[in-house]
Image: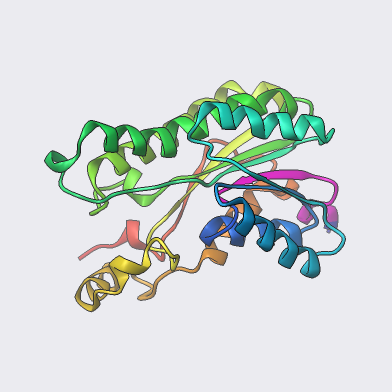
Amino acid sequence: MNASRWRLDGQLALVTGASRGIGHACVRELAGLGADIVLVARDEPYLEQIRDELAEEFPRNALHTIGADVSEAEQRFEVFDFIADLGLDLSLLINNVGMNTPKPTLDYNEVEIRGIIETNLIAAFEMCRLAHPQLAQHANAGIVNVGSVSGLTSVRTGSPYGMSKAALHQVTRNLAIEWAEDGIRVNAVAPWYIRTQRSEPALADPDYLEEVLEHTPMKRIGEPEEVAAAIAFLCLPAASYISGECIAVDGGFLRYGF
C-alpha cells in the first residue's frame, strides 16, 4: 500500500467556519493527516484561541487564522489577500460556512431569504472562484462543499435553506465537470442532524428528538467528527478519481423506508 495516498502532508487547506462544529472537527481531521490549515471564522479572538489549542496538539502543522465573514464580498477578498501576502500555496478548499432561520415559507422577509442564500450559496460559489487560480496549479487539488440532506429531500429546515443547499449541490456538479481539466476535484457532503451548537435547540425538544431518531436507521445523532472524516477522505489522494459526488452523512436517513 502507498501510505502517502492516505496523507495530506505538504498540502494547505482553507476551512471556513473553522472555529466550531463541523468546521472545527474538519480542521482537526485534516491536521491529523498532515495538512497545514488556514482557519477562517467571524469571531477572530475565539478563532485564535482555537488555533493556540490546536497548535499544542499538532505542533508540526502550520496553522494560520483570519477573522472574516465570507458572506461579504470584501472580506472574501481579504482572505485571499492574506493567503497571497503569506506566500501560501492553497491546494484544498472546504466551504463549511452556513446559517439558517427555520420558519414557514410565508413568514420570511426578503432580508432573511437573501441572508441565507448569500451565506450558504453565494459565499461558497465565490470562494471557489477566488480559489481557482491557486488550485489549478496543482495536479490534484480539491474542493469540498458542505451541503445538507435538506438539499436532497424535504425536511423541516425552511425552504430557503433547502433551496440554498440544493443549489450548492448543483454548483458542485457543474464545477466538477468544468474544472476537471484544471486538475480540481469538486465534491460535497450532505449531513443530517449533527450534534453541534446550531442543532442543540431543536434536539433539546425530546418529542422532536424522538421523531428524528425514528427516521434515522442508525438511531442516533451524528457527530461533527463523522462529517469531518468524510470531508477528509474526499481531500485525500486516495480519492483522486472521485469528483462531482455528494456523499450523505446521515445514518441512513435518506434511505429510510416504512
Residue under the image location 38 percent in, 59 percent down: 192
Q: Position of 239 compared to 150: left or right?
A: right
Q: Is residue 7 magenta?
A: yes
At which x and y percent is residue 179? 62, 24
- What is the span of residues highlighted in magenta in the rendered image? 4-17
- Quarter of the image containing the C terminus? bottom left
Q: Position of 72 compared to 54: left or right?
A: left
Numbered disc total: 0
Residue under the image location 74 percent in, 58 percent down: 31
- Quarter of the image containing the N terminus? bottom right
At which x and y percent is residue 94? 60, 44
Q: Nearer the viewer, residue 128 or 240?
A: 128
In the orientation shown, which residue stands out farthest toward the left?
Answer: 106
Q: Nearer the viewer, residue 132 or 46?
A: 46
Q: Is residue 141 magenta?
A: no
Q: Position of 183 compared to 160: left or right?
A: right
Residue under the image location 65 percent in, 54 percent down: 232
What's the colour scheme? rainbow
Figure quadrant of residue 11 = top right
At which x and y percent is residue 109? 20, 35
Regarding residue 37, the answer to whether it shows in the image is yes
Residue 185's place in the image compared with 36, above or below, is: above
At which x and y percent is residue 142? 66, 38
Residue 249's place in the image compared with 195, above or below, is: above
